[in-house]
Amino acid sequence: MPQLDGDLFYATVERSNPELARRFLFITGVADEARFHTFVNTVEVPVLRKPVAVETLLSEVARVTR
C-alpha cells in the first residue's frame, strides 16, 4: 500500500471495527522483513506470501467472506 503499510491499516481497523478486521487477507512479498516478522507471525488472519497461486487466493477469499 503506497500511503500506509498494511499492518498499521489493519491495527487501525482492528481497534475501530474488530468484526471487519477478521475479514482481512494479506498478500505480501515482504513477510520476512524484520519489521513485519512479528506481525505476520501473530496476526489472526490469513497471510499469503507472493507469489500466490490463484487457487489458493480464491480459496482464502471465499473463507474470509463467509
Image (tube, helix red, strand yellow):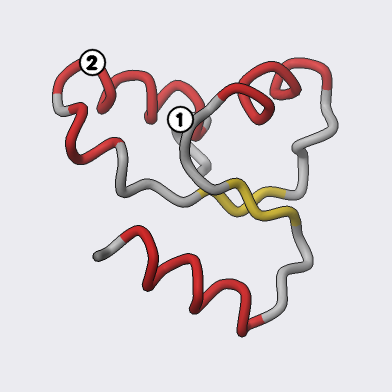
Dot 2 falls on a residue whose secondary structure is helix
Q: Label 2 to label 1, Cα distance in Å?
A: 16 Å
Relative horizontal placement of residue 32, taking residue 21 as reference (left or right): right
Q: Please indicate whether residue 18 sits to the left or right of residue 52 in the image.
A: left
Q: Is residue 50 above or below residue 6?
A: below
Q: List x then y, in percent, for residue 26.
A: 53, 48
Q: In the drawing, does residue 27 fall left or right of residue 44? A: right
Residue 31 in the image: state x and y as whole percent. Answer: 76, 37
Question: Which residue sits at x=78%, y=67%?
Answer: 51
Picture layout, residue 51 above or below residue 18:
below
- Front-most of residues 35 and 42: 42
Q: Residue at x 38, y 28 (%)?
A: 9
The amino acid at mark 1 is Leu
- Disc 2 vs disc 1: Cβ atoms closer than 8 Å? no
Tell me, for residue 21, which label it has, or none.
Answer: none
User: What is the quadrant of residue 56 in the picture?
Assistant: bottom right
Considering depth in this image, is 54 or 60 the residue closer to the camera? 60
- Label 1: state its secondary structure: loop
Q: Residue at x 45, y 34 (%)?
A: 3
Q: Is residue 63 left or right of residue 45?
A: left
The type of residue carrying mark 2 is: Arg
Relative to 64, residue 32 above or below: above
Task: Indicate which disc residue 4 carries.
Answer: 1
Camera-side mark, 2 or 1: 2
Q: Earlier in the sequence, mark 2 or mark 1?
A: 1
Q: Residue at label 2?
A: 15
Residue positioned 37% across, 73% down in the render: 62
Residue 42: quadrant of the picture: top right
